[in-house]
Amino acid sequence: MSGSRLSDGLLNAALLVGGLAVLVLLYGFVTRTFTPRTVPERTAAEDHSRIQVEVRNAAGVDGLAAGVTAHLRRRGFDVVDIGNAPARDTTTVVVRSGTALDARYVAQALGLGAERVDTGGPTTDYSLDVTVYVGADYRALASYDSD
C-alpha cells in the first residue's frame, strides 16, 4: 500500500507540473496573439550602423586608424577592420560593396566633402561597404580636432 501511495503522489505531482506547463504555454499564446505589435523607430545614428567600414592608415602615424575608428563608432558606424595602407597625401573614402550615399555619410562624419569620395565601386567581390584611407592631411579631419 505504501508503494501505491508513492506512485499516486508522483503521478499527481507530474500532472500538476504538466498542468502548469500547459497554463504557461496558453498564457504565452494568448498574450502574443492579442498584444499589438510595435515597430521601433530608428534614429539617424542607428541608420549608419548598417554601414560596414574599414579604416586604413595611409599617413604612417601610429594609432591614427584607431583614433578615426573610435570617432566613427561614436557616430554609429560599424567599423569592422583597421590596418595600414600605402602612403597617401589626402584622406579618401572609397565605395566598396556599399553605395555612394554610404560613403558620403562616412565622409561627412569625418568632415570631408563629396570630392573626397571615390565612387569607383561598388565591387561585388568586396565584403565591406566603405574603406577610409587616412592620408597625410589627417589633422584636418573632424576626428582629429573635435574629439
Image: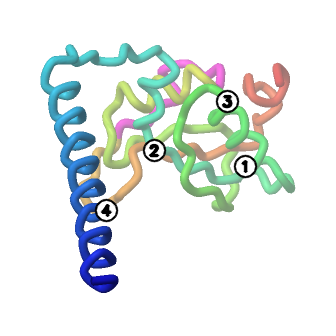
Residue lying at 39% horizontally and 45% vertically, measured from the top left: 129
* Of residues 116 and 80, the one drawn nearer to the viewer in this rendering: 80
Residue lying at 45% horizontally and 44% vertically, measured from the top left: 52
* Real-space CA distance between mark 3 and mark 2, rounded to the nearest whole angstrom: 14 Å
Residue lying at 17% horizontally and 37% vertically, measured from the top left: 26
- Which residues make up the magenta segment? 110-119
Answer few, some or many: residues within 10 Å of disc 2's Cα (few below 14, many 20 plus, some between 14 and 19).
many
Answer few, some or many: residues within 10 Å of disc 1's Cα (few below 14, many 20 plus, some between 14 and 19).
many
Of badges 2 and 4, the one in the foreground is 4
Of badges 1 and 4, the one in the foreground is 4
What residue occupies the far front of the structure in this picture? 1
Q: Which amino acid does label 3 sit on?
A: Arg
Of badges 1 and 3, the one in the foreground is 3
* Real-space CA distance between mark 1 and mark 4, rounded to the nearest whole angstrom: 63 Å
Q: Which amino acid does label 1 sit on?
A: Ala
Q: Name the residue under label 2.
A: 52
Q: Mark 3 points at which residue?
A: 74
Image quadrant assignment for residue 121: top left
First in sequence: mark 4 or mark 3? 4
User: In the rendered structure, are the residues bearing label 2 and label 4 in contact, judged by CB atoms less than 8 Å apart?
Assistant: no
Q: Mark 4 points at which residue?
A: 13
